[in-house]
């Protein structure tokens, strides 16, 4: 889908929530829903949901609302779930291993094609059906497979240099768990910096505020 106007990052970040909740409704056998029902469950306003969906065209019907299965399918197509892209994972330590084994990449628009590390103790292990390769094989692998994205589970001090190297190899997207904000050309390269500590601190703030208000 080619959009005439750019979609804001806040709208993009709400799309997976809509998709996930619609998937739950579909599993429960719910055939239709409304913007108000979605708003109530997701903690948003009906107007916000309608505005978000209108960024991609009209999906609802006056007096009927939204057909759950159709809307979920359309959102999946918009997100890009129907055409999975190849991805690699760099860093097969504790976090990388958990991600490689437990994340169903195909459910989220990607398929994992390779895992790389520099530690000889890790290379050769099998994670999620893939054998961990040494980083010395990375360039040849990228030249052959052309991964679109890389999952970075490496130390902060190494992340920037590795990312820059991967960009030269054709990687154009990063799911970055390396506790740093990558400095790349954001006009060409897409980055999702995942700071797990930020989420935990946000929970800490809300809990302290709720205790203060009691």
Image: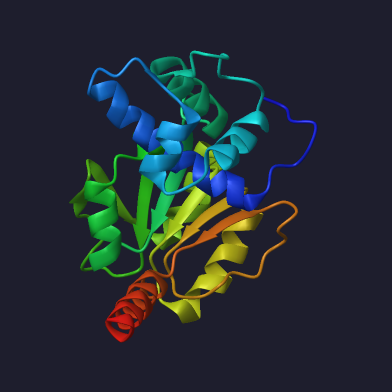
Measured as percent of width and height from the top left, residue 150 is found at 48, 52
- Would residue 148 appear left or right of 91 to someone viewing this image? right
Q: Residue at x 45, y 20 (%)?
A: 73
Measured as percent of width and height from the top left, residue 116 is found at 37, 57
Q: Residue at x 23, y 64 (%)?
A: 122
- Would residue 90 appear left or right of 173 to someone viewing this image? left
Q: Residue at x 37, y 29 (%)?
A: 22
The residue nearer to you, when weighing 36 against 79, is 36
Q: Residue furthest right?
A: 4
Residue 153 quadrant: bottom left
- Would residue 160 appear left or right of 196 to someone viewing this image? right
Residue 4 quadrant: top right
Measured as percent of width and height from the top left, residue 21 is found at 35, 35
- Would residue 57 appear left or right of 175 to someone viewing this image? right
**Quadrant, the N terminus:** top right
**Quadrant, the C terminus:** bottom left
Measured as percent of width and height from the top left, residue 199 is found at 38, 69
Q: Residue furthest bottom?
A: 212
Residue 171 appears in view: no
Residue 72 quadrant: top left
Q: Is residue 108 above or below residue 188?
A: above
Q: How is the image coloured?
A: rainbow
Q: Residue at x 20, y 49 (%)?
A: 126
Q: Is residue 94 above or below residue 3?
A: below
Residue 1 appears in view: yes
The residue nearer to you, when weighing 41 against 83, is 41
Q: Residue furthest front?
A: 214
Q: Is residue 123 above or below residue 102?
A: below
The residue nearer to you, when weighing 69 against 134, is 69
């Amino acid at each position: 889908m080619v959009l005439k106007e750019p979609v804001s990052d806040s709208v993009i970040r709400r799309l997976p929530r809509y998709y996930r909740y619609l998937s739950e409704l579909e599993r429960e056998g719910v055939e239709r829903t409304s913007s108000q029902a979605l708003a109530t469950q997701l903690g948003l306003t009906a107007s916000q949901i309608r505005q978000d969906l209108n960024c991609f065209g009209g999906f609802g019907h006056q007096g009927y609302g939204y057909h759950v299965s159709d809307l979920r399918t359309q959102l999946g197509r918009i997100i890009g779930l129907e055409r999975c892209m190849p991805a690699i994972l760099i860093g097969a330590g504790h976090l990388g291993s958990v991600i490689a084994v437990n994340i169903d990449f195909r459910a989220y628009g990607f398929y994992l094609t390779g895992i790389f590390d520099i530690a000889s103790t890790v290379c050769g292990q099998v994670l999620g059906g893939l054998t961990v390769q040494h980083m010395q094989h990375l360039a040849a692998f990228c030249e052959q497979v052309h991964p679109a994205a890389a999952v970075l589970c490496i130390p902060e001090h190494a992340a920037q240099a590795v990312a820059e190297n991967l960009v030269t190899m054709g990687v154009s997207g990063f799911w970055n768990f390396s506790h740093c904000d990558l400095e790349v050309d954001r006009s060409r390269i897409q980055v999702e910096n995942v700071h797990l500590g930020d989420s935990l601190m946000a929970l800490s703030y809300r809990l302290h505020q709720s205790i203060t208000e009691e």
